[in-house]
Amino acid sequence: MKRTSLAVPAVAVLLVGGISGCSAEERRASTTPVAVASSPEPERLTPQSAAHEFQRFVSNDDVARASGDERLALHWVADGQMALTAAEYRRAVFHGEAVPRYDYKAPTLYVPKLSESTYPQWFVAVAERTAKPAPGARTDPDEARTAVMAFIRRSPESQWKLSLSTLLRDKAELPEIAVDSEGYAGAVLTGETDLLIPPKSVAGIQAAIAEEGPDSVPAKLMKPGPGTTGYFNETRQIKKRAGKAGLAFDVVFPATLHPVFPLRTADGGAFVLYALGRDTVTLAKDTEDRPPIPTDAAHLLDSLILGNELHVSQTLQFGAYDPPKAKPKKPQPKADVIAIDGAVVRAASPQKVN
């Protein structure tokens, strides 16, 4: 079934800040016993409920960050965002620092028009994000970034959680989402074939370019940049330095099972939100040597490096513009990764048993 979305202006958040979730209507007691409890009354996803849930997340996330309460923070996230949140709190503890706190301004919500019985439900929020300054300091306006966040609810019994959060690249612009006369913007099926790349395949194309480089066949479909050829060039540089240091380095970009969130753009294309992994292995060629510990992975190691290998995994989250298929004899625009964020989420040094 094709889904549509509703774009909500920022003022909606101010208007619905006090709105609560749906309340079930009182029902008459049954005259006969029942064997199982009734399921919750399905709640229709609306602009008002989405705005309320966004503000609810922001408030609870800030409470968790202010108190360093990792358990509370993890209660409000899912999918790739769960691993990233856990790693962020662990890093703060390791370095003896406070967990970063954020302000979100001028949010715009894009809400798919789904029936009460359709799950998972989801919506996307786009907002200006700034880091809250330390007490006595001022907010630096130059540090403001555009955050793109996807929220998901998998069943009537579950709560809304943040599934994905990424950041628009500097100087990049969010594509215009198609909005009809009633204010509804279209969502796109993940297998849609009227696009250059079906949304479910965007991550795989990007991964192939990151691993194989600008001369690969998939590179004909995506623009070069930090999220594609940038990773390939970085890998080449790391391998060159590693070789001089007596190390071997390898990297793969595995697919994830996390959800894909595609919105229709005004030109008939799509803006696709998705996740991708980045797994690296650093090997000391001399079995008596130990590979160096990257600064962004030290907080995730449970022990000293005992073997000559170091495995590091990242969760990366992206937003990409996926253009429509060009008409015959017309030039075909390429897809473009315009939002990038992520961090190291696992690190380990397996010790070989002789």
Image (cartoon, helix red, strand yellow):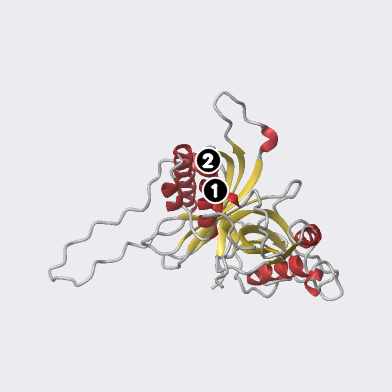
Identified at 45% across, 65% down, the residue is 115
Q: What element carries label 2?
A: loop
Residue 106: % across, % down? 59, 41
Examine the rendering and report whether any part of residue 286 can be seen: yes
Which quadrant, please, contains the N terminus? bottom right
Local packing at callout 2 (Cα closer than 10 Å; few below 14, some 14-19, many 20+) is many
In the displayed structure image, the side of residue 172 where residue 329 appears, left or right: right
In the displayed structure image, the side of residue 349 where residue 220 appears, left or right: right
Identified at 66% across, 43% down, the residue is 145
| Numbered mark located on residue 88 in the image | 1
| Numbered mark located on residue 160 in the image | none
Tag 2 near tag 1, CB within 8 Å:
yes
Q: Is residue 133 above or below residue 19?
A: above
Q: What residue type is labelled 2?
A: Val
Location of residue 112 by image quarter = bottom right
Q: What element carries label 1?
A: helix
Closer to us: 228 or 163: 228
- Residue bearing mark 2: 99
